Every structure is written in C-alpha cells, then in structure tokens.
Image (cartoon, rainbow, N blue to C red):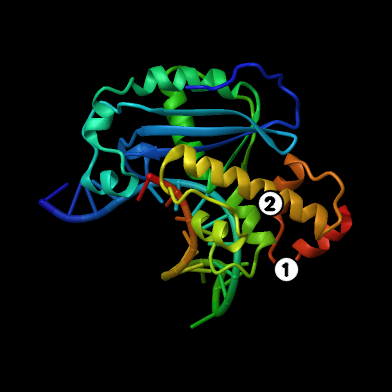
Amino acid sequence: MTLNNQHNKPADTVVVLDFETTGLSPNQGDRAIEIGAVMLKDGKVIDRFQQLMNPGFRISGFIENYTGISNMMLSDAPSCETVMAEFADFIGDYNLVAHNASFDQRFLDAEFRQINRQYPGNFACSMLIARRLYQDAPNHKLGSLIHYKNIHHEGVFHRALADSEMTADLWLAMLEDLQQEHQIIAPDFSLLQSIAKQSKANVLQFLRKQS
DNA sequence: TGCCAGGCCCTCTTTAGGGCCTT
C-alpha cells in the first residue's frame, strides 16, 4: 500500500524497489511474493510502497526460511495482478533503482506483462555502481555494503521494504560520496548509470572529468 | 529422461571459463 499520494513527478525523483520472489527466474515459472519501494526526491523519502502478494501456488521451504514470508502469510494476500496494477500506478514514469537491477527488472517486466502494463522509466543498478565506487569493499552484496558504509539499519534483511530502504540509503550515500570525495556538484541518475558502464580501471579518470 | 537463470565482469580471455549478485 502506498503511504502518500501527494507528490509531483520531477525528473530528480527515483523509485528504489525490491522484490521477494518464489525463485530466481520468471522464465522458470517463478513469481513475485512481495514488492517494497521507496520514492526519493531531493535526497529524502517522500513515499513508500509495500505489499505481499499471492503467487497462486505454495512457496518452497527455502523461500519461507530465506524471506520469513510464510505460505500462511500469503494465503490471504491479494493476487500478483492486483498488487502489480497498484504498483504500476505508484512508479508512474519515474526512473528506477534496484540492487542487482537485472533481477528485479526481469520480475517487474514479467509481472507487468501479465497485466498488460508498461513503464517508461530507466533502471539503474546500485550493485554495478557500488562495484565501481567501492572497489575496496569486501564484496558487493547489499548487506555487506550497508556495513561497509556504516549505514544504519533495523536488522531486517530479505524483506522487500527493508531491502529497498537500505538500497535507497546506499544510493544516497553514493550521491554524497560523489559530491564530497569526487567534487561532482550535482550527480544525477544518468551520471550514476554512466559510472556503472565504466571499466574498473577507468572510472576514476571518468569521475575527474565530471568534477 | 534429465535438466533447470541471466547478465555483468574479470582473466591464466576473445575459438572460454567461472565468480558474483539477486530469490
């Protein structure tokens, strides 16, 4: 459910999202079971979305243990189609951010195909950007980066809203580091997308040209 | 019957292999 519908649609607003799913591949029949999202504008959270959804079949014990989402919790949840229609309205035409975005994009595309909805926004991947900016991090899992950047968290992992909140905080930390450590005055969505496309060796030179 | 993701990225590469990341 969305918590605040009173917002405009400026270009500097992004939606940071995270899916919990029945598995790794929509092509193998996997479905979404939870969507969480945070809307960011000018470095602040202005809206949130969180909803469980019933995939129409029982989820595995592995997924119950991994996410803490049980078959009982999903039994009275609305259908994927109902939730995703509401989520399509939430994201509108904003640009999107996710950690390992190719995963979330596959599920978003698959679930939207089921309800004949589309979105015009672009995706940016916080993992690919973090691999460039934080080359000394022990690894680039979301939880590891949260610890690496000393980002406050509530100790909840692998739930959609909690993970999207942490990804949003990581996104804001990367924007701040680009300003503070790389003297880039106004880093934006397209710049971060470009950083992900730089080679590991060339990214510092690329950043110097932006400052 | 047997198998079962996909994309990015690095390197002991490019006529390939394997690790990382997401559930």
What count of labels does the image hold? Answer: 2
Q: Residues within 10 Å of mark 1 (few under 14, many from 20)?
A: few
Q: Residue at x 57, y 46 (%)?
A: A167
- Disc number placed over residue A3 in the picture, else none: none
Q: Nearer the viewer, residue A2 or A101?
A: A2
Q: Nearer the viewer, residue B1 or A135?
A: A135
Q: Residue at x 32, y 37 (%)?
A: A30
Give the alpha-carbon distance from disc 1 to disc 2, as whole Å: 22 Å
Q: Residue at x 86, y 60 (%)?
A: A208
Q: Residue at x 31, y 43 (%)?
A: A68
Residue B22 at what x, y percent from top left? 45, 49
- The chain containing the residue under callout 2 comes to A
Identify the secondary structure beneath mark 2.
helix
- The chain containing the residue under callout 1 comes to A
Residue A153 at what x, y percent from top left? 52, 50
Identify the secondary structure beneath mark 1.
loop
Q: Residues within 10 Å of mark 2 (few under 14, many from 20)?
A: some
Q: Nearer the viewer, residue A173 or A25?
A: A173
Q: Are marks 1 and 2 in contact (CB under 8 Å)?
A: no
Q: Amino acid at mark 2?
A: Ala
Q: Nearer the viewer, residue A137 or A200?
A: A137
Mark 1 or 2, closer to the camera? 2
Residue A145 at what x, y percent from top left? 56, 59
- Disc number placed over residue A201 in the picture, else none: 1
- Quick check: A205 left or right of A162? right
Residue A41 at what x, y percent from top left? 71, 32
- The quarter in which the C terminus of chain A is drawn is bottom right
Q: Is residue B7 above or below residue A97?
A: below
Q: Amino acid at mark 1?
A: Ala
Earlier in the chain: of badge 1 and badge 2, it is 2
Rendering quarter of residue A70: top left
Residue position marked by numbered label 2 in the rendering:
A173
